[in-house]
Image (cartoon, grey):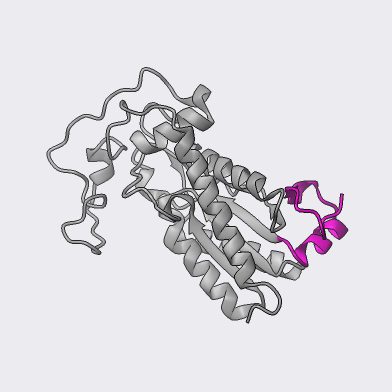
Amino acid sequence: MNPGGSTTLLRLTELTWREARAAGADAIALLPIGSQEQHAAHLPMGTDTLLVTAVVDRAAELLAEAGPPVVRLPALPYGHSPHHLFAAAVSLSAGTLGAVLADILRSLTESGFHRVMIVNGHGGNDEIMRLAVKEHALRAEGAFAACSYWSLGEAPENPGHAGRYETSLMLTAHPDLVRTPIEPHRPVAAPPLFNAPPHPGLTAERHGEWARVGGMTDDPSTARPDPGELSIRATELARAIRAFAEATAPGAI
């Protein structure tokens, strides 16, 4: 193993501390974060964690030949999901998740990593992780980035929750965990306010919306395995990692 110069996928869990220190000099640490929350009746609680892990691993495989080198951290399986507790979830408060991410970023920096990217798989984490990255960059030297896997490149207009998009990706990545038959989304009088705001750019929330729509935003019964979309998400993530590496390389400024 040659963490300092290899472009093969390295997993932090499998490295010795000296190997981790050596890798941190050049490699980008990748932290996938997900959630444990209801995904209607047909998808498992860990859907967000499973999908972001699949995208990160595929992106790392694409980078294995040409780099940049990356070190994959274990996925953080818990996120900010209080809006799913109407059914079932294991949720961290916004403050707790922010503190956990701050501790992880600080630990990585003090352990010798100069570049870290958080890759998110759950919508409720997005604002919190971006704030964590911004705040850490004020305190520590290095370069830090964050993204949600569906938001890169030509992103889907609205990936939704437990609907066609996520179900199609799960049928590709973990078909054995998708319960069948998939029940169709029951029509509701109006789409959930958070998913269809009344004006572009407006964030709008209304109490009880998740329970009203049955925990999903659109019809999952039309989902089919979509290896092409999973490949696109991994390719876009690999491109983002390369761009981040180039922009933060020694002498780039």
Answer yes or no: is residue 44 visible: no
Name the residue nearer the viewer: 247 or 27: 247
Position of residue 191 measured from the top left corner of the image (x, y, whole percent): 19, 44
Q: Quadrant of the C terminus?
A: bottom right
Residue 117 placement, left or right of 180: right
Residue 240 placement, left or right of 245: left
Position of residue 45 relative to residue 202, above or below, is: above
Name the residue nearer the viewer: 56 or 81: 56
Q: Name the residue located 58 percent from the left edge and 43 percent from the top edge.
A: 53
Position of residue 101 measured from the top left corner of the image (x, y, whole percent): 58, 62
Q: Name the residue located 44 percent from the left edge and 50 percent from the top edge.
A: 150
Magenta-colored stretch includes residue 9: yes
Q: How many marks on residues?
A: 0
User: On the image, which quarter does residue 28 sit in?
Assistant: bottom right
Position of residue 84 relative to residue 194, above or below, is: above
Residue 162 placement, left or right of 34: left
Q: Name the residue located 54 percent from the left edge and 59 percent from the top edge.
A: 240
Position of residue 27 measured from the top left corner of the image (x, y, whole percent): 73, 61
Which segment did they paint magenta?
A: 1-27
Position of residue 142 relative to residue 160, above or below, is: below
Answer yes or no: is residue 168 visible: yes
